[in-house]
Amino acid sequence: MATLKETLFKKIQEHRPRTTRLVKEFGDVKIGEVNISQAIGGARGVKCLVTDISYLDPMEGIRFRGKTIPETFDALPKVPGSEYPYVEGFWYMLMTGDVPTMEQTQEVVEDWKQRARVPQYVFDLLRALPRDSHPMTMFSAAIVSMQRESIFAQKYAEGMSKMDYWDPMFEDCSNLMARLPEIAAYIYRMKYKGDAPIAPDPNLDMGGNFAHMMGVAKPYDDVARMYFILHSDHESGNVSAHATHLVASALSDAYYSLSAGINGLAGPLHGLANQEVLGWTQDFMAKLGGKVPTEDELKKALWDTLNSGQVIPGYGHAVLRKTDPRYTSQMEFCEKHLPDYPLFKLVNMIYKVAPDVLMEHGKAKNPWPNVDAQSGVIQWYYGVTEYDFYTVLFGVGRALGVLANITWDRALGYAIERPKSVTTAMLEEAAGIK
Ligand code: NMX
Ligand code: MLT
């Protein structure tokens, strides 16, 4: 049986001529235009990134390597006795585009176990930071601190050929993936659970081991598998994916690049929205003295938020124009495992009320919920109530997608990213107002 790395190399060799041909023979073919509002407004809709790992359709939502979320969950080998697949098998699929067999999945499970040792200095660094540092600061610092381990940086300094860049990049990305769960769980236990980290269990898969190190009983292992897969990738233009890709395009290694992506994920308009949703919901419940709100009370709270110039966290999206299928997937999990949980009922009530409020407000192009509107409820139900940790969970998942992407970036020789800027006066001149 070929290993993941051997299969990946075969795929890379097959793919390279496609990219080379597009650039050499069809480089002048136009795929879009840029207008002033796009230049000022965050490049929304500008097509200037290429990835084959995932694609986001505004109406359908995400497809990973051509598969919808339900198709992904159905296709991949499941952990015995669990509802959800191995994260390791999903990594194989993101990297190669193929659904792995159980044997191929097990090869990755074993490979990650060999790579999983987190250097002691990472724990020392985490302990040296002020304990009230945000967990995303800790997570990002831990990642960048491991940069000295980079095989890519070492091979680059030795003078490696461009054609070989993908290999040490794959090594660094695999090492990172194998180590992130322990780092994340360590931060959680150190910060919130009486400084009592739990050692990894070398017999468990990634999701199972993460639940074990968090100290949360079954089915939290399945929650972890589902959560990491759902949050993995959302094509290339989102802040965390784009930041990782941008930094890697300077041939910065995977440690520098992922840390940059994690810093972007820590923004409240991006990944931090999952903690904001829980913060908003808890504040609202506290104001009502813990009683279940009526729809009118909820509507008023939503309007109060909007009228005070804030966004409704967990709602809206830069690309999506319907309910995020990642929201739906988590909602289905809740319907099965926690149908009567009051917080789930409240989140459902927000889903009933908020889109109409946002439509009446008339600003958001998409009034529907995104992934962050539902994810905190599940964590809360299983006892992970420290909601400023939620974005770290998002970050472990997001690493799967962005690291697969930068491995392919190096395989296909993508260039250093350097778009062009213009001045306001140039825009005024283009608009004919100067
Ligand atoms: N609540 C209130 N106003 C909103 C919302 C919302 N949920 N979503 C968009 N708007 C406003 C937005 O602030 C903008 O206002 P202004 O013209 O005053 O600047 C206007 O509607 C148009 O924005 P859009 O074009 O609809 O959204 P954009 O693509 O710029 O931003 C988000 C997308 C996701 C940043 C935005 O919808 C938002 O701030 N949502 C709340 C935060 C959130 O849930 N983020 C998580 C996204 C998913 N993730 O995990 O990363
Ligand atoms: C994501 O998962 O990255 C978010 O939904 C944001 C985005 O796609 O822009």
Image (cartoon, helix red, strand yellow):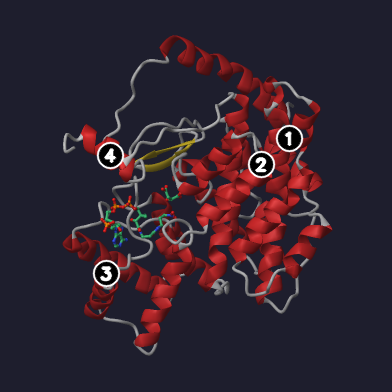
* Label pair 1/2, CB-CB below 8 angstroms: yes
| Residue at left offset 55%, top offset 30% | 416
Residue at image mark 2: 254
Q: Which mark is on residue 425?
A: 4
Which residue, as the protein is rendered here, is positioned at the far bottom?
289
Q: Which mark is on residue 152?
A: 1
| Residue at left offset 72%, top offset 48% | 178
* Label pair 2/4, CB-CB below 8 angstroms: no
Amino acid at circle 1:
Phe
Give the vertical position of 422 relative to 390 (above or below). Answer: above
Q: Position of residue 208 (x, y in %)?
A: 68, 57
In primary-sequence order, the first of circles 2 and 3 is 2
Residue at image mark 3: 306
Label 1: state its secondary structure: helix
Label 2: state its secondary structure: helix
CA gap, disc 3 and disc 1: 47 Å
In primary-sequence order, the first of circles 1 and 2 is 1
Picture quarter containing residue 344? bottom left
* Label pair 2/3, CB-CB below 8 angstroms: no
In primary-sequence order, the first of circles 2 and 4 is 2
